Amino acid sequence: MSQPGNSTPTKGGLNPATGCIGAVLIALFFGFFGLIFGTAVGSLGGGGNPERGLKESLLDGEATAEKKIAAIPIEGMIMESMGSGPGTVSQVKKTLKALKDDESVVGVLLVLDTPGGGVTASDRIYHDLVEFKKETKLPIHSVFLDISASGGYYVAMASDHITAHPTTVTGSIGVISTFPNFSGAMDKVGVKMNVIKSLNSKGEVSFKDIGSPYRPMRPEEEKLLQGLITDMWDRFTEVVAEGRKGKLSPEEVRKLADGRVFTGEQALEAKLVDSVGYMEDAYAKIREAAGEKDAKIISYQREPSLAEVFGFSASTSSSSLEELRVAQELLSTKGGFLYLWTAGGR
């Protein structure tokens, strides 16, 4: 006799409650792997742009609007291939490629919050933006958030209009590279580094280990490196003069290119930016330039890779830590050449 409150076993001894739980577990199992599969496919194709791994997100305006303006974020150190995800250069390039094939895109807004980064990385993004503008004839505007300094300002020179927040820090037009010298500390602890290097054509000391942290830098080495820095500074000022043509002369640009930084208001006074305002002001100006006052503002987000779906890749916070580590390493040991405001390296 069954006890009150107990479920009566069905034929074959299967409890109905157990069967329901099993069905739910099976549904959850297949639902989970369906989600994984869908995300994996998305990572290969992409929701908003098939075959590109990018997904659209609405930032402002009506989702039903036919025309759209693409907001491209450029955040943190401008570098390439740090951590598990794509670097800034490849991500911007990928987004621009997607925009070229989308006839509903009527403009681009660069959203910059960066202290700058690598000389070549900054130049590559600038080059890609200039080529994109030549090919599509679309307006490109920039809006500066907390920081858009050095390489960040360099990248913005591809834009037709720059809006800075009142509290933005910008400028820092210049190049930096650091070469530490540990020889004094090594002498104190009795450590010596033996370096065997090739000589020059006259059999004399060469520049092969220039910038070595194990010995003081020779005057001729410092002169050579300063020449490289000067060439990169020349390139920076030329790009700024081109980007601010009609607003600043090349001579005026060079006077401002001493590494100093400006607030948004100071930058406006110095003619380094075109207006001071907020995000809604930047949206209004790019819509006006595009001739589409009702265009929606969208951004493209990278679909997670299969590794990220399963949790095998670094988190955003750890990627930021990796970014900071690389910046510190470049500045402290590798002697990298940077368009970077070092006080803004986060």
Image: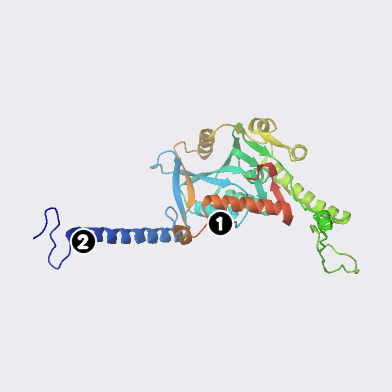
Query: At x 77% / y 37%, what residue is drawn?
Result: 255
User: Percent x, y for residue 49?
Assistant: 45, 55
Residue in view at x 58 percent, y 50 percent: 320
Can I make out residue 273 in this image?
yes
Check if mark 1's residue and mark 2's residue have beta carbons within 8 Å.
no
Quarter that holds the C terminus: top right
Q: Which quadrant of the view contains residue 114? A: top right
Task: Please say if 276 is above or below 44.
Answer: above
Front: mark 1 or 2: 2
Q: Position of residue 330 (x, y in %)?
A: 70, 54
Residue 247 visible from this viewpoint: no
Quarter-of-image position of residue 172: top right
Disc marking residue 33? none
Report the side of 322 relative to 201 (left or right): left
Q: For the residue marked with disc 2, what is the amino acid?
A: Gly
- Mark 2 surroundings: few (<14), some (14-19) or many (≥20) residues within 10 A: few
Q: Nearer the viewer, residue 136 or 19?
A: 19
In front: 225, or 189?
189
Residue with the most extreme left position:
1
**Percent position of residue 9, x then y:** 14, 62
Q: Is residue 29 above or below residue 131?
A: below
Figure colour scheme: rainbow
User: Dot 2 lies on which element?
Assistant: helix
User: Which mark is on residue 86?
Assistant: 1
**Label 1's element?**
loop
Query: Residue 169 appears at what percent x and percent y?
Result: 65, 36
Q: Residue at x 68, y 34 (%)?
A: 262
Q: Amino acid at mark 1?
A: Pro
Query: Pointer 2: what residue?
Result: 19
| Comes first in the chain, label 1 or label 2 | 2
Residue 302 to residue 342: above or below: below
